[in-house]
Image (spheres, rainbow, N blue to C red):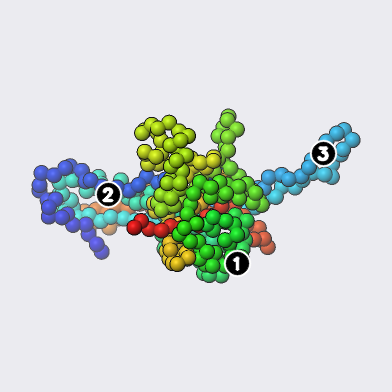
């Protein structure tokens, strides 16, 4: 049992009354989350316990010709809905902090008041890591590289990675061309990526967008209400973002006002190119040493609607430790029932296809 001890330098000193908490990034995914099917990350809430699942219903667009003219009968020429499902497996997530009443008195800051906000931030951090894992899933709980969340996810086997590649060959891109894909061999496809020709650029972002539009079934773009505008969202790691930002530098200087407050050349933040919002997620892991000449490979995930599903059987709740050693120990915890996964179209006997995503892999050479 580990009890929090107040460091000597913080005992009975003229110190700030609150801790300077470790900075934890507000999730770069938050603005793309919501309960509607039009969101990149669709959220769903239900009264579900760990070990059970929540179900998302998916449907393909209608593809029939319909009928036209008074002499054309519609009866017998209707089209059936093509429906699929996606299961969100729910797990329990808990954490806690134990403080002794004596040590809390020594601290110049209020440790008990600090615990709740820190536990909530821990949950936010874990949720961000779960979404990053989901973006790189081959199947439920099986990631294409070592996962960030090792409690509920594990790295997919070679066979599972190859099976994912085969089932999703019309919605992946390795480097600068679709021909870099080695059929049925994920590792060999990564090894085709070199440091010179296969960086993430504006042209490759546009290519991924075209792949999304021509894949079968299509990947649904997001829509701006009232404007008829469509767009996709691309998540990439820091190295991929570095390369595409540099590639788009001249476009942004020539085509946009040189305003230090709004031009991405001078400011950090999202990029926009060809109807694609490009977001940097520093926590997205690289595929270390898997490219040509053992270079690192950066992921770039172009997402449309319903790319990821996040389900809660119970939203985060603060809890208390029942055993307090006659009031001498203070225990505070947090509990939630949650599941996050890539949305994949499931129907018995059919391939497991990513519903709303094009997966890209590009040179991710570390800064010299």
Mark nearer the N terminus (1 vs 3): 3
The mark closer to the camera, 1 or 3, is 1
The residue that appears at 48% across and 65% down in the rendered structure is 292
Location of mark 1 (residue): 184
Residue 350 percent coordinates (x, y): 67, 60
How far is the residue under mark 3 from the one under mark 2?
Answer: 63 Å
Element marked by disc 1 = loop
Location of mark 3 (residue): 67
The residue that appears at 45% across and 38% down in the rendered structure is 252
The answer to whether one can see residue 84 in this image is yes
Location of mark 2 (residue): 22
- In this image, 174 relative to 128: left or right? right
Residue most extreme to the right: 71
- Are the residues at dot 1 and dot 2 in contact (C-beta closer than 8 Å)? no
Q: Nearer the viewer, residue 22 or 286?
A: 286
- Tell me the quadrant of the picture where the C terminus can be found: bottom left
């Amino acid at each position: 049992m580990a009890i929090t001890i107040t460091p000597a330098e913080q005992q009975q000193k003229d110190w700030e009354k609150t801790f300077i908490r470790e900075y934890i990034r507000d999730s770069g995914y938050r603005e793309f989350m919501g309960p509607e099917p039009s969101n990149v990350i669709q959220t769903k809430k239900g009264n579900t316990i760990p070990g059970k699942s929540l179900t998302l219903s998916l449907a393909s667009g209608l593809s029939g010709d319909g009928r036209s003219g008074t002499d054309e009968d519609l009866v017998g020429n209707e089209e059936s809905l093509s429906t699929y499902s996606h299961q969100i497996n729910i797990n329990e997530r808990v954490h806690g902090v134990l403080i002794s009443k004596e040590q809390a008195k020594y601290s110049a800051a209020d440790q008990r008041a600090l615990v709740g906000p820190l536990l909530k931030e821990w949950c936010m951090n874990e949720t961000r890591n779960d979404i990053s894992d989901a973006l790189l899933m081959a199947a439920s709980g099986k990631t294409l590289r070592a996962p960030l969340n090792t409690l509920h996810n594990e790295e997919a086997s070679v066979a599972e990675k190859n099976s994912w590649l085969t089932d999703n060959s019309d919605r992946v891109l390795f480097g600068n061309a679709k021909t870099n894909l080695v059929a049925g061999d994920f590792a060999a496809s990564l090894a085709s990526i070199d440091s010179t020709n296969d960086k993430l650029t504006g042209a490759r972002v546009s290519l991924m967008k075209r792949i999304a539009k021509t894949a079968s079934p299509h990947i649904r773009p997001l829509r701006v209400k009232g404007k008829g505008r469509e767009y996709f969202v691309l998540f990439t790691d820091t190295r991929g973002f570095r390369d595409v930002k540099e590639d788009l530098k001249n476009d942004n200087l020539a085509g946009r006002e040189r305003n230090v407050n709004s031009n991405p050349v001078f400011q950090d933040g999202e990029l926009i190119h060809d109807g694609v919002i490009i977001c940097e997620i520093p926590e997205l892991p690289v595929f270390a040493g898997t490219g040509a000449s053992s270079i690192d490979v950066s992921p770039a995930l172009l997402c449309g609607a319903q790319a990821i599903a996040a389900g809660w059987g119970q939203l985060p709740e603060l809890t208390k430790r029942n055993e307090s050693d006659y009031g001498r120990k203070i225990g505070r915890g947090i509990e939630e029932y949650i599941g996050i996964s890539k949305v994949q179209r499931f129907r018995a006997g059919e391939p497991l296809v990513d519903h709303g995503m094009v997966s890209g892999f590009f040179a991710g050479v570390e800064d010299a």
